[in-house]
Image: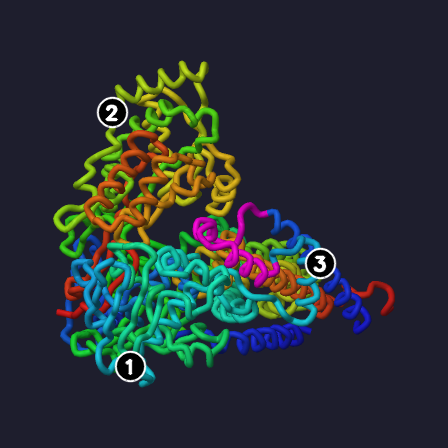
């Protein structure tokens, strides 16, 4: 009898064994530096320093903290996909080490006198990774795709807002020929804009603006982009394997026009969702770079491999104007003034985040010599005494002392920030606020349905210009606090068509003042930072503060 | 026997139908939508409409349900919302393997270690090894597997460098997660077999066996162990299902592309088609394992008849 049980068990095991037979992914790749047995030496974590063997087959390895859900550029909108696509593709321009846009697939471009026509001249002999010539038509196809109703990434606006007949094409009211993207010949690509857009050339570094080969994409049908074999590439690297849950491996693209300047042969983006597991992998030399969470910053900030910087991403409190309490400007101003942002980033976040001095992040483009932030200064000052006065004034106007409810999403950082705000408002205004924690989806639904008082939310810059933030508050939706101000809308709309850069900048500066300082529609909190460790033998691995995330092209091993 | 199994298979289908229906309607009550609302709001009306149509979300929920049921009867589980363009069956299929391998190894480790410890503990009741087993059992049940996983990763992989810290490149990567997962199974099996053995060892037939001069080893293996193993088979069903269907924490710590994290992520993202796909897979698997356990039961213990009375 027992034998029969055993037999049954064996059969079950065999069946499952067969099922799992094809489990492992990727090759038995060697880590960044040497074998994993070397990691045995790195016992003392904080003082860990990597020996750098001078071998040529080192792999540049970074990680993504969520699955790489898709590589199809008209469907992708997340950082994870741009980590891969930015290295496997290239646009007309590419960001350099200093985050400035430089000629890439385009050798040069001309702008007409009325600033409406851009003519890009492609380099000689450009090729896709399969040897097909890369022509201006590949840009026309990719851009039309991104503007069409088929694009599912929610980024069509980034073209249709600017390009002639783009929006009409999206709505099916204009034909492809009428859209302002033309291939004059194989090497000349011309774009016609609706209005002068000083940052238009800088937009072309983004993943949505990369070219696609029509014949190839069409031949793959709905299989395009689902695996590495079903794509062709035009960037510094080609993808050799891709699995959404595992990551992507990349190899230098020999057909790339600037291949001579790409020094690292092999790279990979690995999916690691657990921050401490990623740190362990880094310490075991499996990763070239790792992002630290707040808890680990203190232990590593004196390590020579440590660096930190803030990104073009603003976390802020959105007030809902249709809520009777928050409709009171004094209440909003009191809340905004009562929060000490310096202490927030130093004591609570401690991960390289920067305190918000306004909605537009530190370092974003203003004019030739100064950043937008430098020009507009600090417009969300911390002043507990004033805050208390505004609060009392507000309560008098309302005829009661309201109970505030703050809506937040349920990740650990946001919850810590919410608790901090709770304590600040308690200390400086003497009130107890309620924190309502919801999943991202549930929070969004409450905001869309205008069912909130104030909520913690965030926006990352799509491109390096203040407009990427400021035009969000022109639509008057509940998500944006139902803000409807004719003056504000006029400033933004005028800025959209203004040909004089200085006048345009002035309008945007005024708009930010109006939104943050005068009307207090949002209370900016901080600009998200990243604290990273990078192996000391890895140089030139660039992280851009917006858009295309990590840049392998300039990296090399020392 | 055949008749009984057929009857059970019909029940299996019925149960599945109830689960699928309940999940479908409950899932539609999840707050939010499968789309990132900030991005979705920035799409033109045409694009929003096209997306809703593509996923059939423009119709009423009952109609969606009828359509969905029709599709799954034809083996079509739909397209994932999160993994653009990927079939749900492909997404899930790719994730089952790693979870099942680790789960299976964990079950085998749990059985081997748990049975050995439990049997020795009962045989040497109130001895050092007995107390040791009980400590292991209490620890195994009370220490969550993610703590074990993190500790193993830190010491075995990072400090001693014996095994990889994570990733899914070769078999070595599956060892630590399997061990981390096996602790609770080991503890449960050890405790069960010990309790049962202690009871069995006091039965008259053990005394008889001893009295007729059988060697202690024979008494143990032929009479005591065989009669104690029955309740273990009962708990083995849930243990197998539990371990083979993946663990979010262990998968995240060792970066294993498993199904446990896919399930949690799909719920967080309101990925309707993936939620349904995994629910169907989990429940079908569970019901099936329960059936196997029931059959195995009758094979081990002739006193239990499946179709009571009818087979006479």
Crowd class of label 2 (few under 14; some 14 to 19; many from 20; radius 10 Å) = some
Q: Which quarter of the figure is the C terminus of chain A placed in?
A: bottom left
| Distance from Cα at disc 2 to Cα at disc 1 | 59 Å
- Kindly tell me whether residue B256 is visible in this rendering: no
User: Which corner quadrant of the image does residue A61 belong to?
Assistant: bottom left
| Mark 3 secondary-structure assignment | helix
Q: Position of residue B188 (x, y in %)?
A: 55, 55
| Mark 2 secondary-structure assignment | loop
Residue depicted at x 31% and y 66%: A191
First in sequence: mark 2 vs mark 1: 1
Comparing marks 3 and 2, which lies closer to the viewer?
2
Residue depicted at x 79% and y 72%: B1
Residue at mark 1? A127
Q: Which quarter of the figure is the N terminus of chain A placed in?
A: bottom right
Residue at mark 2? A383
Q: Position of residue B153 (x, y in %)?
A: 34, 60
User: Which corner quadrant of the image does residue B176 belong to?
Assistant: bottom left
Comparing marks 3 and 1, which lies closer to the viewer?
1
Q: Is residue A189 above or below residue A415?
A: below
Magenta region includes residue A400? no
User: Which corner quadrant of the image does residue A537 belong to?
Assistant: bottom left
Mark drawn on residue B204: 3
**Chain under label 3?**
B
B135 vs B75, nearest the viewer: B75
Q: Is residue B57 left or right of residue A122?
A: right
Mark drawn on residue B145: none
């Amino acid at each position: 009898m027992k034998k029969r049980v055993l037999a049954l068990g064996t059969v079950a095991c065999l069946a499952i064994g067969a099922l799992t037979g094809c489990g492992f992914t990727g090759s038995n790749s060697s880590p960044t530096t040497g074998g994993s047995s070397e990691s045995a030496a790195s016992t003392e974590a904080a003082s860990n320093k990597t020996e750098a063997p001078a071998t040529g087959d080192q792999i540049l390895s970074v990680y993504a903290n969520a699955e790489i859900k898709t590589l199809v550029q008209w469907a992708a909108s997340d950082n994870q996909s741009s980590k891969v696509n930015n290295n496997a593709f290239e646009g007309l321009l590419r960001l350099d080490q200093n985050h400035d846009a430089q000629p890439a697939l385009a050798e040069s471009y001309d702008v007409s006198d009325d600033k409406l026509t851009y003519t890009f001249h492609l380099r000689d002999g450009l090729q896709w990774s399969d040897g097909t010539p890369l022509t201006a038509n590949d840009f026309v196809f990719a851009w039309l795709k991104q503007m069409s109703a088929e694009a599912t990434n929610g980024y069509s606006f980034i073209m249709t807002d600017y390009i002639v007949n783009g929006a009409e094409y999206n709505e099916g009211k204009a034909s492809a020929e009428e859209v302002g993207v033309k291939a004059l010949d194989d090497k000349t690509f011309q774009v016609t804009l609706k209005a002068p857009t000083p940052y238009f050339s800088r937009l072309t570094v983004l993943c949505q603006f990369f070219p696609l080969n029509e014949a190839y994409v069409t031949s793959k049908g709905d299989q395009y982009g689902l695996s590495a074999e079903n794509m062709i590439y035009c960037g510094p690297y080609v993808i050799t394997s891709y699995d959404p849950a595992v990551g992507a491996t990349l190899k230098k693209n020999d057909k790339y026009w600037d291949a001579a300047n790409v020094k690292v042969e092999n790279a990979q983006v690995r999916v690691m969702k657990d921050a401490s597991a990623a740190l362990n992998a880094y310490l075991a030399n499996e990763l070239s770079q790792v992002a630290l969470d707040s808890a680990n910053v203190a232990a590593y900030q004196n390590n020579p491999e440590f660096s930190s910087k803030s990104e073009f991403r603003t976390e802020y409190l959105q007030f809902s104007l249709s809520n009777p309490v928050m409709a009171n400007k004094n209440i909003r101003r009191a809340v905004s003034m009562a929060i000490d942002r310096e202490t927030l980033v130093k004591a609570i976040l401690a991960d390289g985040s920067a305190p918000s001095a306004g909605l537009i992040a530190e370092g974003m483009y203003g004019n030739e010599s100064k950043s937008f932030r430098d020009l507009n200064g600090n417009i969300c000052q911390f002043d507990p005494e004033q805050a208390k006065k505004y609060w009392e004034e507000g309560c008098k106007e309302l005829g009661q002392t309201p109970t505030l409810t703050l809506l937040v999403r349920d990740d650990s950082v946001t919850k810590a920030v919410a608790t901090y705000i709770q304590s600040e408002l308690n200390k400086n205004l003497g009130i107890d606020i309620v924190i309502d924690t919801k999943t991202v989806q549930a929070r969004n639904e409450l905001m869309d349905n205008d069912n909130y008082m104030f909520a913690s939310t965030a926006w990352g810059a799509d491109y390096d210009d203040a407009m990427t933030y400021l035009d969000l508050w022109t639509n008057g939706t509940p998500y944006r606090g139902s803000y409807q101000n004719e003056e504000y809308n006029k400033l933004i709309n005028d800025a959209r068509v203004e040909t004089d850069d200085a006048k345009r900048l002035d309008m945007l500066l005024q708009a930010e003042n109006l939104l943050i300082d005068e009307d207090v529609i949002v209370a900016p909190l901080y600009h998200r930072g990243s604290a990273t460790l990078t192996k000391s033998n890895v140089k030139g691995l660039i992280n851009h503060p917006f858009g295309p995330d990590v840049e392998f092209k300039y990296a090399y091993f020392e | 026997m055949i008749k009984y199994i057929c009857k059970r298979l019909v029940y299996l289908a019925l149960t599945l139908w109830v689960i699928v229906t309940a999940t479908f309607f409950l899932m539609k009550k999840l707050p939010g939508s499968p789309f990132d609302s900030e991005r979705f709001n920035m799409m033109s009306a045409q694009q929003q409409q096209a997306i809703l149509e593509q996923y059939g979300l423009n119709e009423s929920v009952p109609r969606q349900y009828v359509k969905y049921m029709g599709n799954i009867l034809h083996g079509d589980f739909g397209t994932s919302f999160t993994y653009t363009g990927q079939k749900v069956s492909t997404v899930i299929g790719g994730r089952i393997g790693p979870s099942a391998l680790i789960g299976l190894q964990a079950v085998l480790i749990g059985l081997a270690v748990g049975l050995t410890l439990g049997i020795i503990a009962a045989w040497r009741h109130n001895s050092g090894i007995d107390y040791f087993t009980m400590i292991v059992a209490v620890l195994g049940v009370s220490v969550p597997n993610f703590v074990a996983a993190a500790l193993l990763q830190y010491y075995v992989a990072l400090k001693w460098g014996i095994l990889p810290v994570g990733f899914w490149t070769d078999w070595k990567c599956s060892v630590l997660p399997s061990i981390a997962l096996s602790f609770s199974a080991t503890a449960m099996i050890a405790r069960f077999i010990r309790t049962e053995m202690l009871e069995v060892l006091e039965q008259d037939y053990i005394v008889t066996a001893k009295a007729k001069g059988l060697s202690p080893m024979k008494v143990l293996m032929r009479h005591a162990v065989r009669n104690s193993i029955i309740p273990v088979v009962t708990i083995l069903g849930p243990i197998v299902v539990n371990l083979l269907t993946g663990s979010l924490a262990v998968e995240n710590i060792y970066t294993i592309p498993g199904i446990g994290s896919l399930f949690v992520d799909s719920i967080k993202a309101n990925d309707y088609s993936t939620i349904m796909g995994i629910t169907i897979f989990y429940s079908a698997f569970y019901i099936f394992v329960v059936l196997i356990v029931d059959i195995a039961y009758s094979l081990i213990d002739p006193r239990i008849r499946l179709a009571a009375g009818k087979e006479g």
